[in-house]
Image: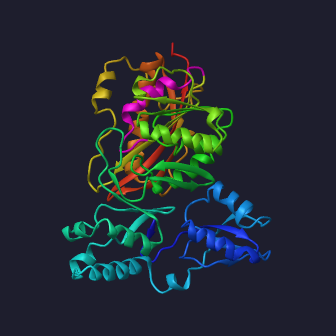
Amino acid sequence: MEGEGGKPAAVVAVVTEPRFTQRYREYLEKQQLLDRQHRLEKMPDGTVALPVLGEALPERHLQELRNRVAPGSTCRVTQLLDPVPSKKAQGSSPAQRLRLEVSRWVEGRGVTWSADLEADLPRSWQRHGNLLLLSEDCFQAKQWENLEPELWKTVASALGVHRVAKRGRVSPDGTRTPAVTLLLGDDGWVEHVDNGIRYKFDVTRCMFSFGNITEKLRVASLPCAGEVLVDLYAGIGYFTLPFLVHAGAAFVHACEWNPHAVVALRKNLDINRVAHRCQIHFGDNRKLKLSNIADRVNLGLIPSSEEGWPIACQLLRRDAGGILHIHQNVESYPGKTLQPPGSSEMEKEHSSYPQQIITNQWTNGATRDSRRKMPSAATKPEWQRWAESAETCIATLLQQVHGKPWKTQILHIQPVKSYAPHVDHIVLDLECRPCALLG
């Protein structure tokens, strides 16, 4: 996210020899790809890096530069990790530039600039390459309506982008379709790169959370070599791709019921060259016909993935079990009693089954608590209480699904992000293993 006074952590640039710099610059300007907010940079080997807009420079432009614009030139893409702002950009913050250019343009249209209009300007936004995604709480005054669509060209020029979109509220349609309106540009497709993984998606059709980056990095580091994994809420591949690209999963079954997310997921599997190790299951994952296949199941849905718990238990291998990665939003209001899992209709449905549950006992007679990884000092009591109640609930479901008791162990509780005041998005890593029926 780029906010007031902020700048991207890194900028993509195309590198060539000094004698070809002007030709490259002219081509990039003509294609509206040149990043005017950052300076050209001389590289240690004497070549010159020209900053460009976007997360990557499409191959067709690289071929044009190599073959037609400057034949024989060095033409490669790099990242400037500490880009230097241009002289124009150094004079003011992005928010200040926006205010200055918009106010001048508005007054040039005969509209009086007011404190109300200034207060209605955005203070922060998301930037996806050359697309600016505004939040829903800006440009709400009625005066703006008479200034569209030229207004959005002014906004784009001020912030160095070519497309502008505005976010609304997430649609309550079960697929979390974002209510995003494209204000300037032909389409909403963008590309984002996390940890060397390319994600392409349409911002008007699919969600993308920057706040999940810590969990995507953690998933990428898990030891999944040779494992079969099921991602019950795959989306555009937020976690499916790290499991495949970096964690070494042998195969992933990716479940998703948003058709627009499935289109993006197929594209992302292809561009990251892992499509041969993934099968997409389109539709409601509660109707999934798979069972007894998974070494791991990822349940990456918030505020709760509880409706997916029964199918997750069904998916685990009967002979060896596996690990569940359970996402949840947990409240931590002082003095508030935590509502445990098991109170929903889904849990009531299974409460009548006979229970011979092992959550703290292992086959060698030792208690699980003696082997449990102790919670870190950063773990909130509310997280721990929710994890323990979820563990008990999962043990009940495992017995109901498989017809015998299983042992469970809380391996780790991972905070992902603050979802709202006093509400934390966390992930529970829960180990689930079958054990012999007691005599």
In this picture, residue 407 sits left or right of residue 78: left
Q: Can residue 299 be seen in this view?
A: no
Query: Which segment is the magenta one?
Result: 301-319
Instruction: Please tell me which residue lies in front, 295 or 211.
Output: 211
Indicate the quadrant where residue 174 lies.
Answer: top left
Name above or below for residue 146 compared with residue 346.
below
Residue 188 percent coordinates (x, y): 43, 53
Residue pushed farthest top? 439
What's the residue at 45%, 37% (across, down)?
233
The colour scheme used to paint the residues is rainbow
Q: How many marks?
A: 0
In this picture, residue 148 sits left or right of residue 357: left
Instruction: Please tell me which residue lies in front, 85 or 26.
Output: 26
Name above or below for residue 288 compared with residue 119.
above
Residue pushed farthest front? 68
Residue 250 percent coordinates (x, y): 66, 33
Name above or below for residue 61 compared with residue 283.
below
What's the residue at 42%, 31% (across, down)?
309
What's the residue at 78%, 77% (across, down)?
46
